[in-house]
Amino acid sequence: MGEKAGHSLVLIVDDTADARDAMKALLELKGYPVATAADGQEALDELRHGLQPALILLDLMMPRLDGFSFRKEQLLDPRLSRIPVIIFSGHPEVRNYAEVLGAAACFQKPVDVDRFLTLVQEHCTHP
């Protein structure tokens, strides 16, 4: 994909289409190019086929391949392990999970728009 308006690509991984679409729309309004995946397996497939996001926004609870399993696979791949991840979930332990998984940051669902945008801006590095 590439860069637009000085921002780097963000990959959103979430099985809930409405949440995924809402985050995508917010980021695109701020000038970020966005790719999406409906679960961890789809995200891994895209990454292994050349998608190069500067940041991954990762839901924890998903079918097929959840955020925990995605993160384990991501960290095992030297090319993918350098991509920062922000974890999000409706689970009350999201902060603890983010720490255990070595995430750059985390936020709770439902999404606080200002916090969401601030975290993306802070952690979306230019390749």
Image (cartoon, grey):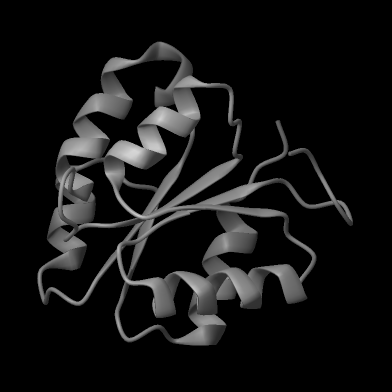
Residue at 65% across / 42% down in the picture?
125
Q: Looking at the picture, tell me which residue is in the foreground, 105 or 61.
A: 61
Q: Looking at the picture, tell me which residue is in the foreground, 88 or 115.
A: 88
Residue at 40% across / 72% down in the picture?
17
Name the side, left or right, on which 84 lies relative to 114. left
Rendered position, 49 above or below 39: above
Relative image position of residue 22 (x, y in whole percent)? 52, 79
Residue at 52% across / 21% down in the picture?
49
Q: Quadrant of the N terminus?
A: top right
Relative image position of residue 60 (x, y in whole percent)? 21, 57
Residue at the right extreme? 5
Rendered position, 6 above or below 84: below
Relative image position of residue 108 (x, y in whole percent)? 29, 77
Q: Quadrant of the C terminus?
A: top right
Is residue 82 something one can see in this rendering?
no
Is residue 35 something one can see in this rendering?
yes
Name the side, left or right, on which 124 lies relative to 73. right
Residue 92 falls in image quadrant? bottom left
Relative image position of residue 112 (x, y in whole percent)? 44, 87
Name the side, left or right, on which 3 lies relative to 112. right
Name the side, left or right, on which 108 lies relative to 57. left
Residue 16 falls in image quadrant? bottom left
Q: Looking at the picture, tell me which residue is in the foreground, 84 or 34.
A: 34
Residue at 61% across / 31% down in the picture?
52
